Image (cartoon, grey):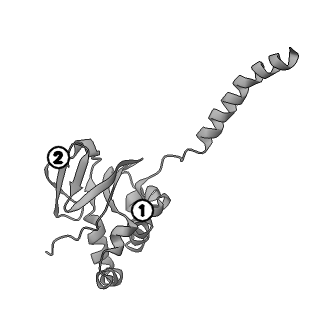
Amino acid sequence: MTIFRRTLMTAPVLLALSVLTGCATTPAPATIAETLARTPQLSTLNKLVTDAGLTDTLKGTGPFTVFAPTDEAFKAVPAKTLAELAANKARLAAVLSFHVVPGKVMAADVKNGTVKSVQGANLATSRAGTFVTVEDAVVTQADVGATNGVVHIIDKVMIPPAR
């Protein structure tokens, strides 16, 4: 009987410890820049953001909405184009800024129409139910929260129109 009573008394303590341990593994709130760095499928974008000198901006107060191309999306970009962007930091920053919209726009708030990117050009957006597109890219993972906005993971790299 003593063992049974001791087990019943320790069960709530063990439950509380397991809940606290579970909380300890939950990632702390992160900025958009930190979210990009933490997300393995966005490693190319994270490197390019760093190369373009935009990390501090994406750590800033925002809010921003980032349409973040995956590593697979970057693999589809011609090597010549990537080499040109690597050699021209201003052009790289312009391409990356084309993927950013001022304000926090959740997927459910996307309207059919256009929004102005931070780069200055308009982005065509569309939503049908939970299916969201921006330009010709499909949002594959929506509403990745950040302390200074939101990230939507997309399947293509968008190149702004020539000015």
> Which image quadrant for residue 158?
bottom left
Residue 89 position in % (x across, y down) = 33, 78
Q: Which residue is mark 1?
A: 56
Mark 2 nearby-residue class (10 Å; few <14, some 14–19, many ≥20)? some
Image position of 5 with respect to 152: above or below: above
Residue 68 position in % (x across, y down) = 34, 60
Q: State if disc 2 and disc 1 touch (CB < 8 Å).
A: no
User: Which of the two discs, 1 and 2, sits closer to the camera?
Assistant: 2
Residue situated furthest top in the rendering: 1
Left or right: where does residue 12 sit relative to residue 40?
right
Q: Which residue is mark 2?
A: 111
Left or right: where does residue 102 sit relative to residue 59?
left
Residue 23 position in % (x across, y down) = 59, 39
**Rendered-image quadrant of the N terminus:** top right
**Rendered-image quadrant of the C terminus:** bottom left
In-front residue for pair 7/162? 7
Q: Residue at x 16, y 71 (%)?
A: 161
Per the image, label 1 sits on a secondary structure element best described as helix
> Which image quadrant for residue 78?
bottom left
Residue type pointed to by label 2:
Lys
Left or right: where does residue 67 sit relative to residue 2?
left
Mark 1 nearby-residue class (10 Å; few <14, some 14–19, many ≥20)? few
Residue type pointed to by label 1:
Asp
Image position of 84 with respect to 67: above or below: below
Residue 60 position in % (x across, y down) = 39, 55
Per the image, label 2 sits on a secondary structure element best described as loop
In-front residue for pair 78/120? 78
